[in-house]
Amino acid sequence: MKNRIRIERAIMNITQADLADRVQVSRQTINAIEAGKYSPTLALGMKIAQQFEKTVNEVFELDEGD
Amino acid sequence: MKTKYLLPHHYQIFGWVATVLGLSIMFWGLLIGEAVPFKLEISFPWPFTGGKGFLDSPVYNGMITHDIADELLCILMITGLFIVAFSRQKIEDERIAQIRLEALQWGIYANYIMLFVCVLLIYGGSFLMVLSYNMFTPLLIFIARFYWLLTIRPALQARKERSLS
C-alpha cells in the first residue's frame, strides 16, 4: 500500500514519534507504514488521515500487490 | 487495537530472569550428562503401604523421599517462557499484535515439523528426551521468531539501507 504520510508529516512539520504519540502506536509502526512494510487496519488508517485533516483515500493508495 | 489476554509489560523482566536461570541450569545439566545438575530431596509421611508409592518414589518406614529438582526446573522454565511470550510490549499496537500472531503460527509449525522428523528418526529412551524438550520448544521458537521480527530484522534492514545510501 502506497501512502503520503512522509509528505504530510513534512507539511505539518512533525516527526514519526510525534505522529506515533498522536495515534497511540509505536514509532516503529509509523516507520513500517511509511516504508510500505506494514498495511495498517482501517481504524489506524483513519486515525492517521484524521491527524492530517485528510480522508483515508487522500493519504493511502492501493498498490498493485494489494 | 487492544490485545486481550496479555500480562502487563513490567512482568517481562521476571520472565527473562526465570528463563535465563532455567536455561542455564538445563545447559549445566546437559554438560554433566544429567537432566538436572543437582538434587533437592524432600521427605514427607506416606501412610499407605505397597506399590511404588507416590511420585514413583519408594516408601521407607512410612516416609517418602522425592527429588523435586526436575519439577522445579520444569515449572521455572514454563513460567519464565510463558511470561516472556505473553507479556505486553511497552507500546502494544496492532503491528505488534500481528507479529505476535505470525510468530505464534510459525512457532507451532516449526515445532511440529521438528517433532515429525524426531518421530521418524529417534526411538526408545531418547525419544522421551525429545518429548521433554518439546514442552518448551513451541514457546522458545515463538519467542525467537517474535523478537527476530520485532527488533532484529528491522535493525539489520535499517543497517543495510544505511550502508547502501
Image (tube, rainbow, N blue to C red):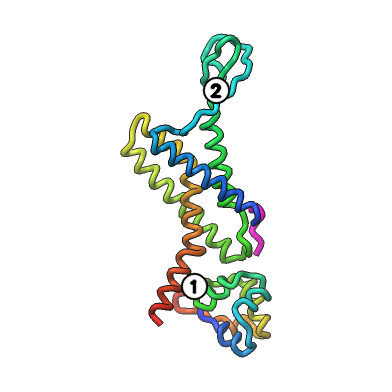
Depth order, front residue of B89/B33: B33
Front residue (pair B148, B42): B42
Q: Secondary structure at mark 2?
A: strand
Q: Position of residue B60 (x, y in %)?
A: 55, 11
Give the class, few, some or many, for how many residues have Cα within 10 Å of label 2's Cα (few <14, many ≥20).
Answer: some
Residue B115 against residue A2 in the figure, above or below: above
User: The residue under label 2 is which amino acid type?
Assistant: His
Q: Name the residue at 66% across, 61% down.
A: B2
Mark 1 chain: A
- Look at the numbered disc 1 and give the secondary structure of its residue: loop
Q: Name the residue that disc number 2 marks.
A: B66
Q: Residue at x 53, y 37 (%)?
A: B74
Quarter placement of the C terminus of chain B: bottom left
Over which residues does the magenta segment extend?
Answer: B1-8
Chain letter of the residue beneath label 2 in the structure image: B
Label 1 – label 2 distance at C-alpha: 54 Å
Mark 1 belongs to which amino acid?
Lys
Instruction: Answer with left or right where residue B83 lies relative to residue B118.
Output: right
Label 1: few (<14), some (14–19) or many (≥20) C-alpha neighbours in 10 Å: few
* Residue highlighted by disc 1: A37
Q: How many numbered badges does the structure rendering display?
A: 2
Question: Residue drawn at (56%, 84%), measured in percent from left and top?
Answer: A6
The quadrant of the image that shows the N terminus of chain B is bottom right
